[in-house]
Amino acid sequence: MDDAGKPTSEERPRLPFAVEEALAVFALAVLVALTFANVVVRYFTDQSFAVTEEISIFLMVAMVLAGASAAAGRDVHIRIEYFVETGSATRRRALLLFAALASAGFFFAFTYFAALYVWDEYRYGETTMALGLPRWWYSIWMPMLSAAIGLRALGFAHRLFKRGAP
Amino acid sequence: MIGLTLFALFGVLMLAGVPIGVALGLGGALAIGLSNPETKLFGLMAAPQNFHAGIAKYPLLALPMFVLVGSIFDRSGVAQRLVNFCVAIFGRSMGTLPAIAILVAIVFGGISGSGPANAAAVGGVMIAAMARAGYPQAFSASVIGAGAATDILIPPSIAFIVYSISVPAASVPALFAAGMIPGLLAGLALMIAAVWLARRHKMGAAEAELPRPPFWRSLMEASWGLAAPVLILGGMRAGWFTPTEAAVVAVVYGLFVGMVVHRTIGFRDLYSIFREAAEISAVIMLVLGLAGIFAYAVSTLGLADPLVGAIKNAGLGSAATLALVIVVLVIVGMFLDGISIFMIFLPLLTPLMRTFGWDPVWFGVVITMMVAIGQITPPMAVNLLVACRLAGVRIEETFPWVIWLVGAFVLASIAVVIFPGLALWLPRDLGY
């Protein structure tokens, strides 16, 4: 949650983090608007448009994955910093590289299984409860954005590597 | 054997500085794969399913909303006006300003849901004010970090929302009500310790010479901020809003106060406020999702059973087991943040809770108090870190001061452990 004190790369990524950030900000802004509209509508009309729940959940998942992608590129995910922050510069660099590569590896594998999950939903023509939309419209974002997280982690490792040994 | 693999791999990855979420996901996925060698794809289709199930929950929407509330009120100018009002009430005698810092943190805790957000908002105002009054920066940072630790006990609280997701027997409103008295008690203990420290070391001698703001005008200016906790907590109590709705109403109210009343937030600031909130929420909720894989592995493979069985067979009673749990959580809390502690330990602690018949609401308050202590105990202390950065001191310098405040917080926690009524009276009285 806080990036100070952490060695960050001077080099900027070719694709700015602003791309995922804009997506996450957009999702959060729509979430606020939908939820507030729900409160207002229910207050004045005693009706709720509960169908928006489904869209809200989708937006929340998209916000998490998009925000996590930018956070992976900046290397600000929650970790135990004790051993990364102490010790020699060589050890710190090695640990940071290892962490970024482990993250990338995990998210690429996760992308594969998430893609199969979406494929199943598509194949069996599953639809959502409230709106009756095809489920894969919502879930397709999961493999796409987890691939993005993996790429951002890889990008961080690359920038760290390029900087050379301390 | 598979259980051992899971915990060993997970432990090594975590200590090596791999992001907590990734360590949870890798450990969980490996355990699932090892135990399903014959199943198609090693049963790993459970990974995306459980990740999705971990965050695709409507009540969890309260989390990003309350994070956003914290980001908005941090810049709404409310903290400054609350401080002025408190100074107008309590005056300028020696040792008053540290107590005011903690009091403002408590009131702010009734708006925001996380400790670091509270430390940033209160610290942004109080660090400079305490420096002018002659308090050493390391002392100010300690007081502000410790005061902010009450935030996750005083409702609303992100910690309680996460706890309730993992322990559905404890509802969010019941937890919110249960945290109130323990939070105030901890705040009171901190105030006593802070004033005692200030007087003993004759700090803040310049405080008496500073001007005292006029009472009525500061009350008027502070009223917008003071109304926020009333709106949030009163609205939930009156049954007007669910926690999520209360949060979104607070978002709109905070934007109104910041943009129209105090004029501290411009249109250009909106994007950065939303970006900050989206990213903080994403980092927290990624851990929740990936912990879903870990929790699935632990529960379906029955990995917690041997551990729980060992504790049961060790013949420790309820009290000794609880003491053990508390000691472990305090130690772990020195290195890990609260959300991760909940997600890693709750799959192990819930069976213990059932075995010994601990009240889930009370237990939630107790372990949240341990998390709060972890937030101010070096070396890993998020609240203290935020306050130290604002004060420009190193975290080591705060040690001689913060240790007394940690002690005061521990005493308040012991009281809640011994007298569960301190936590449970209010939710029972309110009928949750």
Image: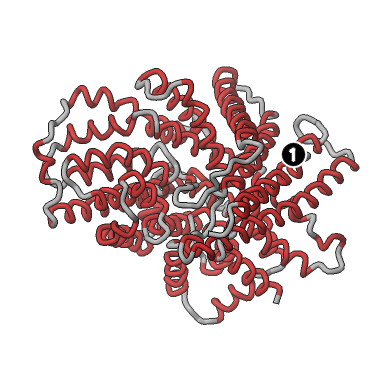
Front-most of residues B350 and B399: B399
Front-most of residues B326 and B394: B394
Instruction: Say which residue appears at 83% left-offset and 34% top-offset.
Output: A134
Give coordinates of residue B134: x percent, y percent: 16, 45
Instruction: Say which residue appears at 55% left-offset and 42% top-offset.
Output: B281
Q: Quadrant of residue A48?
A: top right
Position above or below: B250 against A126: above
| A73 displayed left or right of A4 | right
Position above or below: B104 against B5: above
Chain to which mark 1 belongs: A
Residue located beneath label 1 in the image: A141
| B94 displayed left or right of A130 | left
Front-most of residues A80 and B403: A80
What residue occupies the far bottom of the structure in this picture?
B314
Give coordinates of residue B74: x percent, y percent: 40, 34
Give coordinates of residue B243: x percent, y percent: 51, 37
Q: Is residue B81 visible?
A: yes
Instruction: Determine crowd level at label 1: few under 14, some 14-19, many 20+ residues with C-alpha closer than 10 A.
Output: some
| B136 displayed left or right of A125 | left
Position above or below: B13 against A156: below
Q: Is residue B291 visible?
A: no
Local secondary structure at mark 1: helix
Instruction: Say which residue appears at 39% left-offset and 31% top-offset.
Output: B75
What amino acid is at disc 1?
A: Trp
Give coordinates of residue B301: x percent, y percent: 72, 67
Instruction: Say which residue appears at 62% left-offset and 72% top-offset.
Output: B8
